[in-house]
Image: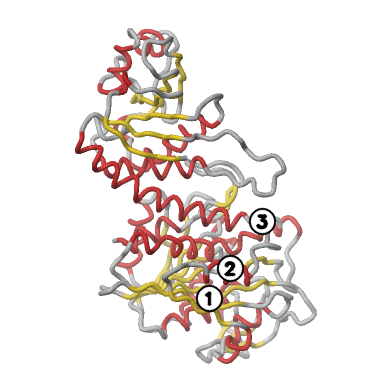
Amino acid sequence: MNLTVSKGLLEEVSANILVVNLFEGVKVPAGATGAIDIALDGLISDFVIAKEGFTGKFGSTYVLPTYGKIPAEKVMIVGLGKSKDFSLNKLREVSAKVVKKCLKMQNCKKVVSILHGAGVGGFDAQNCGQMIAEGSYIGEYSFDKYKSEKKTKKIEDFVILDMVEENCKKAKAGVKKGKIIASAVNFTRSLANEPAQWATPSKLAEIAQSFKELDVKVYDKDEIEKMGMGAFLAVAKGSSQPPKFIHIKYKSANPKRKLAIIGKGITFDSGGLDIKPPSSMLTMKDDMSAAAAVLGVMSIIKELKPDIEIHALIAACENMPGASAYKPGDILVAKNGKTIEVDNTDAEGRLTLADALCYACDLGVDTVIDVATLTGACVVALGNVASGIMGNNQSLIDKLIKCANQGGEKLWQLPMFEEYKESLKSDIADMRNTGSRMGGTQTAALFLQNFVKKVHWAHIDIAGTAYIDKPVNELAKGATGAGVRTLINYILS
């Protein structure tokens, strides 16, 4: 889909579908929708609203033939909901819904849309352009790589039209940024949707090495062992797939700060010897969703040109119950020398993150953010609506929550009370890798904190938001790209 911005009048443009909008409860449309209503001799107000009862409820649509009164073949009226509830996040979502609706229609190669939100919505045209672009490309996405019959319906041209030159100029800048962000989200979704037979640790390393103009170092098993990453290597022992530790570096000319982002990279999680039941293994290809998110961010970072230094880290491996698999009761030595008693081999992600956190803290960065599909407890607590966040610096947590909200993602802070630490105590090692079933997300974060030193640190648990089994907001069923927009907004903040 080629999404562009043009100056012009709606009633003069040729298109298969012309998209206008309506706030809930409006009886006589104004602005651009009003202009089209007049051009159609009152069909929107007198027929669609008065007789058909279209109310403008958020996300609802009504498609109306134009009967040759204007060059566009059909008009789609999309409901924006109540004006007091409308937001930029709502604009992104409704833009995705419009594209999805168009893709279900016959002969919809060219779509022209008004610059939603920049008129009576009262939002800056640049922000509106960005949200429309993000929503449109996210809404267009599908993963049919392995289907014999591919989806053939496509929108070839999507044009945002406005009659004000300054609005067009701003919208173009917004669209450019929105395209970049959406491409990172969709890159992440495609990678996380891939089966584990394809998305192996070696494949993740190969993808990282394909990023041009970024410094990429991939460490193999022997090098990982030399670095003392005993916790990470233990998890990898049961798999025939070799582990890979991936370090991607981006640096601007004059970096204002130094940041490390870590993505959990378990490319398949069987649970190890503490094997999962079959139903729990069905979506375990997505246990590398956070690694996919980090790769998604780094895939577009050169286009955004932030004035910082970024170190993206992934400890990639499989957790399998092979003959050499690590066992309950084993004692592991992490990179910082701390010892860990293995209480459960299905609490493997925190072990790989432990060594990655040690590595990150040795880089001289100011801030470390790790993202992981870490605990089922987070799914129980927050469902698929929000990701959990914890850390050692409240300002960092607050900023990440704000960045998530701006990106249409939700973060909810969970406590890290000292009392939770009790369940991590071991009789024979410095700690166990799991605690009580109660407060499982918090105890996992407290475990990770043992491997953080002298940096501001935040941990984001995306276990419930990385993969959805039915459409939510602008997202389709499957991998969501959780964390990408939050990280990008934080990097650009």
Picture quadrant of residue 333: bottom right
Q: Earlier in the sequence, mark 2 or mark 3?
A: 2
Which residue is label 1 attached to?
246
Q: Quadrant of residue 485?
A: bottom left
Q: Residues within 10 Å of mark 2 (few under 14, many from 20)?
A: many
Residue sitting nearer the eye, 70 or 204? 70
For discs 2 and 3, the disc positioned in front in the rendered view = 2
Q: Which residue is mark 3?
A: 283
The type of residue carrying mark 3 is: Thr
Around disc 1, counting alpha carbons within 10 Å, would you say few (fewer than 14), some (14 to 19), or many (20 or more)? many
Q: For this view, does 390 lie left or right of residue 351?
A: left
Q: Is residue 389 above or below residue 352?
A: above
Q: Amino acid at mark 2?
A: Leu
Separation of disc 2 and disc 3 at Cα? 18 Å
Of the residues under marks 1 and 3, which one precedes in the sequence?
1
Looking at the image, is mark 1 or mark 2 earlier in the sequence?
A: 2
Q: Which residue is mark 2?
A: 204
Q: CA distance from mark 1 to mark 2?
A: 8 Å
Residue 424 shows in the view: yes
Mark pair 1, 3: CA separation: 24 Å
**Are circles 1 and 3 on residues that touch, CB within 8 Å?**
no
Contact between labelled residues 2 and 1, with CB atoms less than 8 Å apart = yes
Do the residues under discs 2 and 3 have CB atoms within 8 angstroms? Answer: no
Q: Is residue 417 above or below residue 66?
A: below
Question: Who is closer to the viewer here, 418 or 331?
Answer: 331
Q: Is residue 392 visible?
A: no
Establish if 323 lies above or below 61.
below
The C terminus lies in quadrant: bottom left
Q: Does residue 183 appear left or right of residue 44 in this picture?
A: right
